[in-house]
Image (tube, rainbow, N blue to C red):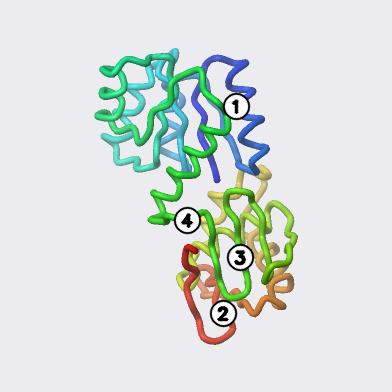
Amino acid sequence: MRILLVEDDEALALGLTRNLERQGWQVDRLADGRQAMAKGLVDQYDVCVLDLGLPGADGMTVLREWRAQGAAQPVLVLTARDTSHDRVAGLDAGADDYLVKPFDPPELAARLRALKRRSEGRTSETLRLGRLRMDLAHRELFLDDEPFYLSPREYALTEMLMQRAGRVLNKEAIVAKLSSWESDFSENSVEVYVHRLRKRLAPCGLTIRTVRGFGYVMELDAPAAQSQPA
């Protein structure tokens, strides 16, 4: 999961970043509302965590501008403003969830997972395709019931392919999702990782098929099938 964290309290932002990265997630951190406004309109994020009391432009202004410009990424508002009026105003401005400080980091992580599930139309934390099962909450992969180990980037790419199993996943989307792992991640890097994954997943009865000019499709060897939530 790729997250944009907009929080001007440096200590809190650093602690949250470390906690979210321990989940295996990629976090871009900003402290200025105007910078966040531009960033959220240009880059693709799975979820945005947005404080309201920001320099440059307050979080409510940022949120309204995102929605006015068609940015549809889920937004969790994180704030010390805990009145009913504030919560209603945030939700009416386009927030998908609202969490009041102080809070427990595990609750924040659970809410972010739930937002991502809803944005993908899923109700479960598990993906299945053939003999392969992915536990999204704990970032674990199993072949039948045995742990199946991949590197973080291999896991992230496998997750993307399983979520769109039977449908084309284009290279540009892969680069956008994985680029924060390394600054020079490119379409050539995608080809390297796909080649590596083909070898790793062959014993699972899965194929990653190249659709020239478009991208890749993950399929069962026979017949092709889509992954379904458990």
Q: What kind of residue is marked 3? A: Arg
Q: What kind of residue is marked 2? A: Leu
Q: Residue at x 38, y 33 (%)?
A: 97
Q: Residue at x 62, y 74 (%)?
A: 131
Marks 1 and 2, how far apart at CA: 38 Å
Nearer mark to the viewer, of 3 and 2: 3
**Where residue 133 is drawn, which disc sits there?**
3
Is residue 9 or residue 191 the one in the foreground?
A: 9
Task: Provide residue 123's location: percent of width, then percent of height.
Answer: 42, 55
**Where residue 220 is drawn, which disc sits there?**
2
Q: Is residue 66 above or below residue 128?
A: above
- In the image, is 190 to the left or to the right of 57? right
Q: Dot 2 surroundings within 10 Å: few (below 14), some, or many (20 or more)?
A: some
Marks 2 and 4, how far apart at CA: 21 Å
Marks 3 and 2, how far apart at CA: 13 Å
Mark 1 vs 3: CB contact within 8 A: no
Marks 1 and 3, how far apart at CA: 29 Å
Q: Secondary structure at mark 1?
A: helix
Nearer mark to the viewer, of 4 and 1: 4
**Residue that badge 4 annotates:** 124
**Residue that badge 1 annotates:** 16
Q: Secondary structure at mark 3?
A: strand
Sequence-wise, which precedes: disc 3 or disc 2? Answer: 3
